[in-house]
Amino acid sequence: MDTSSHRGRIWVLTDTSGKLIEDIDTDQIFHNAFLHITEIAEMGRHALGNLEGWKDFPKKVRPGDIIVAGRNFGAGSSRQQAVDCFIALNVGLMLAPSYSSIYFRNAVNSGFPVLRCGDVDSLVNGRKLETGDEVEVHFLNGRGRNLSKTHNFSIEPMSAVQRDIYRAGDLFAFGRSSGRKE
């Protein structure tokens, strides 16, 4: 498995006017009505179920697809299910200008690649990133490329720690592989 890049179709989370949605909170990502679900595999069908215009996302997304979101993605509670629902759907990665600190840490610890792209707003507004485009993102060198439009863009590369956790699979696997003995 190549852990230095990912290629997939993108989903740009916009409202009905085409504006990138900002401040998507964990209740919009995974509604609290489903917190009783404990099997990660079952969480995917509820992803974005409380985000207006995106309730059918779990039926449309394919393994490896990429989510593009507005700033402060994952605001609100420290709900792990808001990360796990995307893992259940085999979403390949997420791009946003910023994430809530708790969401970002939960995603990194789960081995789910969340990457920062400060230019997301201008890329979406300039129609350089649109739902359905095929994109390739290089985690380590900060390069992205829209293969559908032959347009390059920059991302913030993964930190060494994020990369190591991602390559291991999650924080627990990373800990086991580090070989440290107490």
Image (spheres, grey):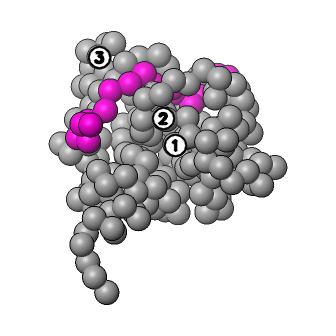
Numbered tag placed on residue 60 in the rendering = none
Where is residue 48, by image quadrant? top right
What's the residue at 34%, 69% (across, down)? 175
- Residue 156 to residue 45: above or below: below
- Contact (CB < 8 A) between labels 2 and 1? yes
Say left or right for 87 vs 25: left
In this figure, which residue is indicated by the disc labeled 2? Answer: 91
Callout 3: helix, strand or loop? loop
Give the magenta part as a residue range. Answer: 1-17
Callout 1: helix, strand or loop? helix
For this rendering, which residue is in front, 3 or 67? 3
What's the residue at 41%, 65% (across, down)? 172
**Mark 3 residue crowding within 10 angstroms, few (<14) / some (14–19) / many (20+):** some
Measured in 3D between alpha carbons, the distance from the residue under mark 2 to the one under mark 1, in whole angstroms, is: 6 Å
Say left or right for 159 vs 81: left
Looking at the image, can residue 160 be seen? yes
Quadrant where the N terminus is found in the figure: top left
In this figure, which residue is indicated by the disc labeled 1? Answer: 87
- 13 in magenta: yes
- 44 in magenta: no
Measured in 3D between alpha carbons, the distance from the residue under mark 3 to the one under mark 2, in whole angstroms, is: 19 Å
Percent x, y of residue 66 = 44, 31
Percent x, y of residue 117 = 36, 41
Numbered tag placed on residue 147 in the rendering = 3
Q: Earlier in the sequence, mark 3 or mark 2?
A: 2
Where is residue 121, by image quadrant? top left
- Contact (CB < 8 A) between labels 3 and 2? no
Q: Amino acid at mark 3?
A: Leu
